[in-house]
Image (tube, rainbow, N blue to C red):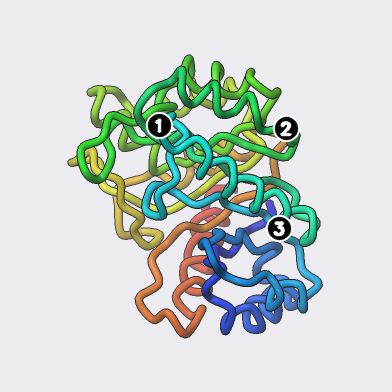
Amino acid sequence: MKFGLKLWSKNKDLVGEASKLINEFFFHYVELFYVPETEIKPFLEHDIPYIIHIPTEKFGLNIGDKTKKEFNLKIINTCIEWADKLNAKYIIQHADYGSLEDAKNLLKEVHDERLVIENMPKVGINGEKMLGYEPGQLKELMDIGDFGFCLDFGHAAKASVSMGRDYKEYINELLKLKPNMFHISDCDLKNEIDEHLNIGDGELDFKFLKECILSTKSEYVTLETPRKNLNSLDEDLKNLKGLKILFELYK
């Protein structure tokens, strides 16, 4: 497996530390979440592997809203430019919320084989009805441009809570979409609202998650765990070590 470290593009002061952790083979790549109006220069100064994450609704982007089409395409195309300059392996796009047809129409204007669609919880943080929480919708979005798939385990678990389903059974359905990469964190199974807990602080079965990853041809696994100290990657390293310990227990 190749483990990814999540950075936002405003975290320019952390890229040096991230590069060091990659050169020392703790992490293997940076998944860089693009924040609008930030500069690419600090990240070009480090010769490390990248994956780009397109901004979410927090920054006004939502492919399921046709009134935002021009803004959406501007931001997505900027992310494609960043991916070109950083030689990124993948570009991650949330399935977002709203109209499936609007989302499909938007994606018809995106032409990049590196794009991977990330599955969503069924219910958003503000009660939104999310798109792409179930395999049928995801496949419709992926088929628009022969796009790939990013399987977020936490999002899948939360969607299963909303539907009253066993999360392992549900994740096994999503695996049929042949994920190109994964997002991993912990979460509880008592509520349907998305959360990203430290490894071991929730209820997910990491033996099962390891088996899921190994059952695919994908190597890329990004940690999406919390970082309270925004000036250090110590918490990320602690979560990585915890994940590796759990995975080593289940050989």
Left or right side of 30 for 59: left
Q: Earlier in the sequence, mark 1 or mark 3?
A: 1
Q: CA distance from mark 1 to mark 2?
A: 19 Å
Residue 70, image x, y percentages: 53, 39
- Residue matched to label 2: 111
Res 49 quadrant in image = bottom right
Query: Where residue 174 sits in the image (x, y, percent)?
Result: 50, 25
How far apart are the alpha carbons under marks 2 and 3? 15 Å
For the residues bearing labels 1 and 2, Cβ distance under 8 angstroms: no
Q: Give the CA separation, mark 1 to mark 3.
A: 24 Å
Amino acid under disc 3 = Trp
Please give the residue where the numbered disc 3 appears in the rendered image. Answer: 82
Q: Earlier in the sequence, mark 2 or mark 3?
A: 3
Where disc 2 sits, the SS reads: loop
Q: Is residue 177 above or below residue 202?
A: above
In this orientation, does residue 169 appear?
no
Q: Tell me the kind of residue under disc 2.
A: His
Mark closer to the chain start, 1 or 2: 1
Mark 3 neighbour class, 10 Å CA radius: few under 14, some 14 to 19, many 20 or more? many
Point 44% across, 48% down: residue: 56
| Relative image position of residue 73 (x, y in whole percent) | 58, 40
Front position in the image: 216 or 81: 81
Lateral position of residue 79 relative to residue 23, left or right: left
Q: Is residue 104 left or right of residue 188?
A: right
Q: In the figure, residue 159 lies in which quadrant?
A: top left
- SS class, disc 1: loop
Mark 1 surroundings: few (<14), some (14-19) or many (≥20) residues within 10 A:
some
- In percent of the image, x 55 and y 59: which residue is there? 33
Q: Which residue is mark 1?
A: 65
Residue 27 figure quarter? bottom right
Q: Residue at x 45, y 45 (%)?
A: 61
Seen from the viewer's position, the closer of residues 129 and 174 is 129
